[in-house]
Image: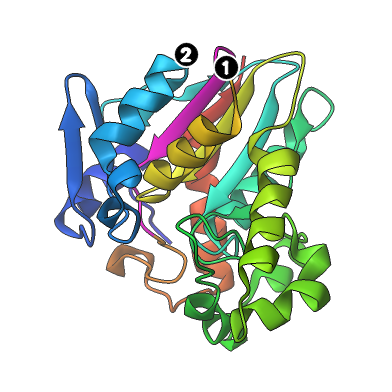
Amino acid sequence: MKYLAPMLLMLHLTAWQPYNFYTSGQHTFKVDPILEKRLEGRPEVVLKAFLAKGGTFHRMTETSLPFELCSGDDVYPICSGGWCRSQTLLMMLQKFKSELSLHPSHAARHGYDPYDGEIHRKHNITYETFIDEYEECFGRPKFIRAGFENSDEWEPMLTHPTQEGLAKIREYYTKNYYGQITEGRRVFLTFSANVHVVMYRLAESNESLDNVIVVGFDMEDLISHPPKEWNTYPRSQVAYRAFYDLLSQLIVLR
């Protein structure tokens, strides 16, 4: 099968943009339509707070060189549901696991974290029952997502949320994911409008972001919506392998 070169593919995908962009100076990222409705979640407010605390945002575009991870980095792979893109990213990063501290994949928008005061996991539940060839492709089941070890306890919050229960879940992600204390760099690798949510949660979870980098890929979920050039169906072995190969050329270890 013929794949497009990674940067050509990123350029090719600019025709499909389900989210709006926000631009301020040198910074551009896609906007989460739910978060931007909140005053404190407006993209200009989020970016200002993130940068004011020392955070660094690095956008990956069709002209970007591969992003370089450094030995000793704490790396956090994130996508909307923690189900396809970040799972493949975490699998790709396994080849560097002796040099990096790898954290679980995280569902920033469609998981349990009530980032805007509500849980939006329902958006992904049915989707996760569809045919999926991740295990056939990589020879192992998907990694457990951050916080999902608490699914039995948190599941009732989907239908009968309480302020106390939502606050408890939010605090879990604040302490155990976004607000972890590490010795070296914390690098959050994420996609599309998740950049907006990740910067928001980081800014509210930390006093300082001096050692934090958010790397944003404009790509949508190519595994579930594979380009026609891949000649395959959603979540197939071919789609997973193609996305893995793409990521391998976009992220390297220095």
Residue range of the region highlighted in magenta in the rendering = 208-220
Looking at the picture, which amino acid does disc 2 mark? Answer: Gly
Pick whichever of labels 2 and 1 is earlier in the sequence: 2
C-alpha separation, residue under disc 2 versus residue under disc 1: 6 Å
Looking at the picture, which amino acid does disc 1 mark? Answer: Ser
The secondary element bearing badge 2 is classed as loop
| Residue 140 visible within the image | no
**Residue for point 28% across, 51% down:** 36
| Residue 99 visible within the image | yes
**Residue for point 38% across, 65% down:** 230
Is 93 part of what is drawn in magenta? no
- In the rendered image, the quadrant that contains the N terminus is bottom left
Is 217 part of what is drawn in magenta? yes
Q: Mark 2 points at which residue?
A: 54
Q: Mark 1 points at which residue?
A: 208
Could you say which disc has been placed on residue 19 in the image?
none
